[in-house]
Image (spheres, rainbow, N blue to C red):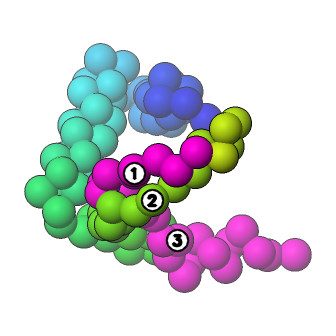
Amino acid sequence: MIRSELIQRIADENPHLYQRDVERIVNTIFEEITAAMARGDRVELRGFGAFSVKHRDARIGRNPRTGEAVQVEEKHVPFFKTGKLLRERLNEK
């Protein structure tokens, strides 16, 4: 599902809301999650999961084409850990 499909589904399920308002709400939620992660904060959505930022140290990597050693700079990467309810729902039989 992409963002526009999510917006459309929420708008369809809530006919009392304008689609432009639903779009603004969804965009605001994503922007707030992004801003919190940019500050290094953890974002937890109970029952769904938690977004956090992991730090990766600088290291020596290899160019897969040439085998040449390459310096890889330190970086921060997004990380998502599923919540218990989501994990259980995905594994229902």
Query: What residue is shown with label 2?
Result: 60
Q: Which residue is mark 1?
A: 72
What is the x, y in percent for residue 24?
Answer: 24, 27
Please state the total of marks drawn on the protein image. Answer: 3
User: Between disc 3 and disc 1, whose residue precedes?
Assistant: 1
- Quickly name the residue at label 3: 82
Disc 3 residue crowd, few under 14, some 14–19, many 20+, Cα 10 Å: some
Residue at 61% in and 35% down: 1
Badges 2 and 1: C-beta atoms under 8 Å apart?
A: yes
Residue 82 magenta-highlighted: yes
Towards the viewer: 30 or 57: 57
Q: Residues within 10 Å of mark 2 (few under 14, many from 20)?
A: few
At 40% from the left edge and 62% from the top edge, which residue is drawn? 59
Q: In the image, what residue type sits under mark 1? A: Val
Residue 91 x/y as whole percent: 77, 75
Please tell me which of labels 2 and 3 falls first in the chain.
2
Residue 48 drawn above or below residue 75: below
Q: Residues in magenta?
A: 68-93
Residues at marks 2 and 1, CA–CA distance in whole angstroms: 6 Å
Tell me, for residue 88, which label it has, or none.
none
